[in-house]
Image (cartoon, grey):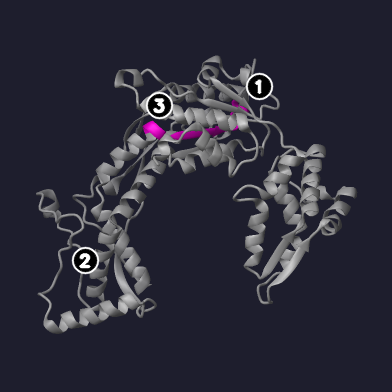
């Protein structure tokens, strides 16, 4: 099944595996994602008129806003970046460039496409790597020739091929190579250390003043400047992996990677702008609020649709899906500038977590926090057994602490459980036989309730 054409019901079903409640927010993002597929099936002239319906999520911290967006992007294989709106509000607003979020997005897309391409040439790259490794173990040089004049006049070798030094192998050398090959396949030489030469891929990144862009000088002049190499002492197993990566990079057409990454970004990219409420302000005539409104006005063109220059090419933001989120405790969505409000037509309210939600979060999701602790302590031969009444008590305590102190949502469970299991985690060392540790209501009362009653929990809870 193509992940990009999942139905809204399928999307919500996937989100339900990791996020408890918040059905309205799940429906909103599911519809927004499905609309992308619907748009792709329209005639081109109509496609250009259909823009994404961006979403703004309103709700307290720790209720699932970020997790919904992150999980959404993960299981549909979409490029995704999360940015904090507050990082653009530096004094005088001379620091971060808001277009950097788009550049971060294309970097994510490049990595995703490149990983797919590497997988497609994995067998071929491994065969070439093994060939290089065999020659290295035989004591033969096997370094690509950096022919500057050849680069200039187009006499380069075909990608993935090597110009190998030395005469044709003799029968004795062929037999030696066959023996080495058998040992490599059997893993007999994995731990043997050898010295190899690897490409010195220095960053080579230089900033372009006033543009917010960075260019790679090494890539730009790679056809003229010979590649540099450095020596490393590694095991045979590590050398094979290094050679494999180098050969895969030669087999991949980076121009095609760039083209596909730009298309993936423009059609399926998701940018999550968190803490957008922190840049909302009303009726200000000076001070930090000027910077806040400035940030809003700089974000506006990206959301409306513009072209951003990146080192991989120009990226259009017209059809990137923007999801904004904020608690809006002090300000409200109406405090954002009207133009920006209009670009987020879908507004969903996320509810605060109830006792029942806390109980479900502990056990139901595939990555439930209780399961995480059980797996971690199992490494040190401790088998945690949580009784139902203990889980109910933990959920109740977490809810109560959120009520009387700062409400940090589901994150409260992490701090409560860290305190609850502090003694077990400290004493477990893996040197003993597997032991069972039962967490019942009595255990919870002993380790948590006393602290709550004495009002000492505050120093343990953030």
Assign a secondary structure to mark 2. loop
Disc nearest the viewer among 3 and 1:
3
> In the rendered view of the protein, which quadrant contains the N terminus?
top left
Image location (x, y in percent) of residue 184 = 31, 76
Range of magenta residues: 266-279
Q: Residue 430 falls in which quadrant of the image? A: bottom right
Determine the residue positioned at 57% across, 26% down.
56
Q: Is residue 368 left or right of residue 136?
A: right
How packed mark 1 is, by other alpha carbons closer than 10 Å (few <14, some 14-19, many 20 or more), is some
Instruction: Say above or below: 45 vs 28.
Output: above
In front: 377, or 317? 377
Per the image, the residue denoted by label 2 is 143
Residue at (26%, 77%) from the top-left corner? 181
Which mark is on residue 38?
3
Going from N to C along the chain, the mark reached first, 3 or 2, is 3
Mark 1 vs 2, N-terminal side:
2
- Residue 395 in percent (x, y) is at 77, 46
How far apart in space, not on screen, are marks 1 and 2 (Cα)? Answer: 62 Å
- Residue in the foreground of this view, choosing between 308 and 2: 2
Residue 278: image tag:
none
Given contact means CB atoms under 8 Å apart, are the residues at marks 3 and 1 in contact?
no
Residue 204 seen from this side = no
The circle on residue 332 is 1
- Residue 85: quadrant of the picture: top right
Marked residue nearer the N-terminal end (3 or 1): 3
């Amino acid at each position: 099944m193509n992940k990009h054409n999942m139905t809204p019901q399928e999307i919500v079903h996937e989100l339900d595996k990791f996020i408890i409640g918040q059905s309205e927010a799940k429906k909103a993002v599911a519809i927004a994602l499905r609309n992308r597929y619907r748009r792709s099936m329209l005639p081109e002239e109509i496609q250009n008129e259909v823009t994404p319906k961006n979403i703004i999520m309103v709700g307290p911290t720790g209720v699932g806003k970020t997790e919904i967006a992150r999980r959404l992007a993960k299981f549909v294989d979409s490029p995704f970046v999360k940015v904090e709106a507050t990082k653009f509000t530096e004094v005088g607003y001379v620091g971060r460039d808001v277009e950097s979020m788009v550049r971060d997005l294309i970097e994510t897309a490049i990595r995703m496409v490149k990983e797919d391409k590497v997988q497609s040439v994995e067998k071929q790259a491994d065969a070439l790597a093994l060939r290089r490794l065999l020659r290295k173990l035989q004591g033969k040089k096997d370094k690509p020739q950096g022919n500057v004049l050849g680069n200039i006049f187009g006499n380069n070798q075909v990608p993935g091929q090597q110009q190998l030094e030395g005469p044709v192998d003799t029968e004795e050398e062929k037999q030696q190579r066959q023996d080495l090959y058998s040992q490599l396949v059997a893993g007999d030489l994995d731990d043997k250390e050898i010295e190899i030469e690897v490409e010195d891929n220095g960053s080579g990144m230089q900033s372009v003043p006033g543009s917010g862009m960075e260019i790679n000088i090494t890539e730009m002049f790679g056809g003229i400047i010979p590649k540099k190499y450095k020596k490393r002492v590694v095991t045979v197993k590590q050398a094979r992996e290094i050679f494999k990566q180098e050969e895969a990079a030669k087999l991949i057409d980076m121009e095609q990677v760039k083209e596909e990454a730009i298309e993936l970004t423009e059609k399926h990219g998701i940018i999550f702008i968190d803490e957008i409420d922190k840049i909302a302000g009303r009726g200000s005539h000076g001070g930090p609020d000027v910077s806040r409104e400035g940030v809003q006005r700089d974000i506006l063109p990206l959301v409306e649709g513009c072209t951003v220059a990146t080192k991989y090419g120009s990226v259009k933001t017209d059809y990137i899906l923007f999801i904004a989120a904020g608690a809006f405790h002090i300000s409200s969505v109406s405090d954002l500038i009207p133009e920006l409000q209009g670009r987020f037509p879908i507004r969903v309210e996320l509810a605060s977590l109830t006792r029942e939600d806390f109980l479900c979060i502990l056990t139901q999701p595939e990555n439930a926090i209780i399961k995480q602790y059980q797996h971690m302590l199992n490494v040190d031969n401790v088998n945690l057994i949580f009784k139902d009444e203990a889980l109910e008590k933990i959920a109740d305590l977490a809810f109560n602490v959120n009520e009387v102190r700062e409400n940090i949502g589901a994150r409260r469970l992490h701090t409560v459980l860290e305190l609850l299991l502090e003694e077990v985690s400290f004493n477990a060392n893996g040197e003993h036989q597997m032991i069972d540790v039962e967490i019942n209501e009595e255990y919870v009362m002993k380790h948590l309730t006393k602290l709550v009653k004495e009002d000492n929990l505050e120093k343990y809870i953030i």
